[in-house]
Amino acid sequence: MSCNSLNKKCLFDINPELITEKHIKLLSNAKKGVFCFHCAVHSKDLLFNRNVLNRNINNVKCKDAMDRLDKHTNVETSICFTYNFPSQTIDSIIEDTIDYILLLSPSQLFALPLLIFPGTEFYKKPSKYGIIDFDRQPPYGIIETKTLSKDEILRMIVIMEAIVYIYNVIELRTSFNLLISNIKNHSPGRMYYKLARHLTDGGKTCWEKFANLKYDYVRYIKIMSSDYNIPITVFNECVAKVAKSSFERYGDRYGSATFQ
């Protein structure tokens, strides 16, 4: 397979469960940068997927397909997920969503807080689904649920944006993944959440304007290395991965960002 005549990347929305060995064989001939497969994955919780999203998802098939695309093809993958659903808590977002998506290891992430659009069941019957308050005018954002307070929802939006940023800066992702791979019995999602909370001052500040992001990150992982007895050689390698980075985000819809 060669690149199309316009030399543009082709983006397809897919259900990874439907990827077969025949698809993998065909895609193995594609050049790097030609295709990107985009899929929506919100949670590994089967009951949540069935009862809230009305979807039956096979997590094993999904993980297997993502692994085969990564190992046997040059296809890039992106995952878009929604969070702050009614019934979700901060812990369930970390454990059932962030942990699972990190396990799938896509090329890039996109995250959106839940919006309550007119005509949906959430809009018509909010109390039935545990929604206490939401904007009935654009942008239709959720304000409070029975399981997430107003403050938690606002903080989660900032923190999740930071998590996506950390992941989509390849140098940051590889550095932090190397560090946490040396920590036993940990939740990757919780590690990313804690880092994002630190970089955003607990989800309260405009974190992207924080001029010393690179250096604050290094200070943070130095403390982590001490707390978890990570070898100095690993710490040095993690630092080296971000030392010369301009922190340009992979596939960033906001444009690149450089921190001095």
Image (tube, helix red, strand yellow):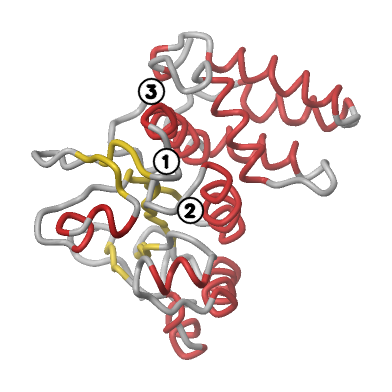
Between the residue at mark 1 and the residue at mark 2, the CA separation in whole angstroms equals 8 Å
Q: Position of residue 42 (x, y in %)?
A: 43, 59
x 44%, y 34%: residue: 156
Number of disc labels: 3
Q: Quadrant of residue 239?
A: top right
Callout 3 environment at 10 Å: few (<14), some (14 to 19), or many (20+)? some
Q: Position of residue 242 (x, y in %)?
A: 62, 26
Answer with left or right where residue 82 lies relative to residue 127: right
Q: Secondary structure at mark 1?
A: loop
Mark 3 or 1, nearer chain start: 1
Q: Which residue is mark 2?
A: 107
x 49%, y 61%: residue: 43
x 67%, y 45%: residue: 188
**Disc marking residue 257:** 3
Q: Residue flagged by tag 3: what amino acid is it?
A: Ala
Q: Secondary structure at mark 2?
A: loop
**Disc marking residue 218:** none
Reply above or below: 196 against 260. below
Marks 1,2: beta carbons within 8 A = yes
Reply above or below: 120 against 21. above
Quarter of the picture holding the N terminus: bottom left
Callout 2 environment at 10 Å: few (<14), some (14 to 19), or many (20+)? some
Between the residue at mark 3 and the residue at mark 2, the CA separation in whole angstroms equals 19 Å
Q: Which residue is mark 1?
A: 250
Callout 1 environment at 10 Å: few (<14), some (14 to 19), or many (20+)? some
Reply above or below: 70 against 240. below
Judge by depth and name the residue closer to the eye, 227 or 79.
Answer: 227
Between the residue at mark 3 and the residue at mark 1, the CA separation in whole angstroms equals 11 Å
